[in-house]
Amino acid sequence: MTLTAEHVCKTIRNAPILQDVNLTLEGGTVYGFVGRNGSGKTMLFRALSGLMKLTQGTVSLDGQVLHRDFSVLPSLGIVLEHVGMYPNLTGVENLRYLAGLTRRAGEADIRTAIERVGLDPDDKRTYRKYSLGMKQRLAIAQAIMEKPDVLMLDEPTNGLDDDGVRKIRDLILEEKARGAIVLLASHNQEDIRILSDHLFRIDQGRLEKLS
């Protein structure tokens, strides 16, 4: 499985957001992306996933072209800065609803995903009563419950305690071992150092390979 970006550019209101990005990403590999706020990390994930149209260039998965053969990546788990959940539903009820949209994850998949991030699938608290860390864990659970081919995680350990950080790091390595393409953006330099097989820096929308 190969995800490829060729000469990807994005301009918003005449401002360059991504500039001539070229990438080849393979399954079973973790790719780390670092850069200051506003450097283009989140926009890159949006471009590669199909959540944002490109100004120029192409993104393809195993030869099939994004926005031509499919509108978004067909097997995608993603965590960006804003995760929409229903405040009056429990964690498992939220994931049941989301799973019903694609019908790719069953009840066992949902419960397993919740347990993998360190939450209790039988917890009766509604989402509005979750702590920041619990909300972050649930966001990651929804990203992994369908066993996606491509997993994009923007600041996955944000708001987590030490136990949560360990669980999510282990989970990322498990997803890598499963064969997923994992893209990781984090301000936590230890996350990047421990988990990444290849490291890139983004600055003003330009991508530089560091290792």
Image: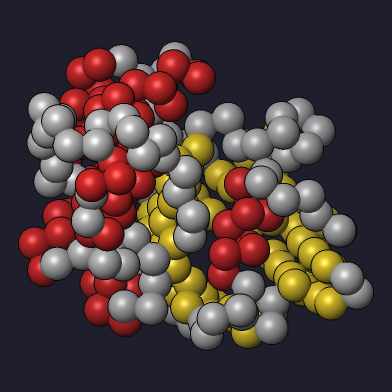
Q: Position of residue 57 (x, y in %)?
A: 82, 56
How many numbered marks does the figure carry? 0
The answer to whether 9 appears left or right of 14 in the picture is left
Q: 79 or 7: nearer the eye?
A: 79
Above-or-below relation of 50 to 122: below
Q: Position of residue 188 (x, y in %)?
A: 31, 78
The answer to whether 85 appears left or right of 55 in the picture is left
Q: Residue at x 84, y 68 (%)?
A: 11
Q: 205 or 86: nearer the eye?
A: 86
Instruction: Give the position of the C terminus as an image quadrant.
Output: bottom left
Above-or-below relation of 113 to 170: above
Above-or-below relation of 48 to 126: below
Q: Is residue 209 visible?
A: yes
The answer to whether 169 appears left or right of 3 in the picture is left
Q: Residue at x 33, y 73 (%)?
A: 192
Image-quadrant location for residue 145: top left
Q: Residue at x 41, y 39 (%)?
A: 85
The answer to whether 140 appears left or right of 20 in the picture is left
Q: Residue at x 80, y 64 (%)?
A: 10
Q: Residue furthest right?
A: 14
Q: 99 or 176: nearer the eye?
A: 99
Q: Is residue 183 visible?
A: no
Q: Position of residue 44 (x, y in %)?
A: 63, 62
Image-quadrant location for residue 103: top left
Above-or-below relation of 159 to 61: below
Q: 89 or 120: nearer the eye?
A: 89
Image colouring:
secondary structure
Image-quadrant location for residue 40: bottom right
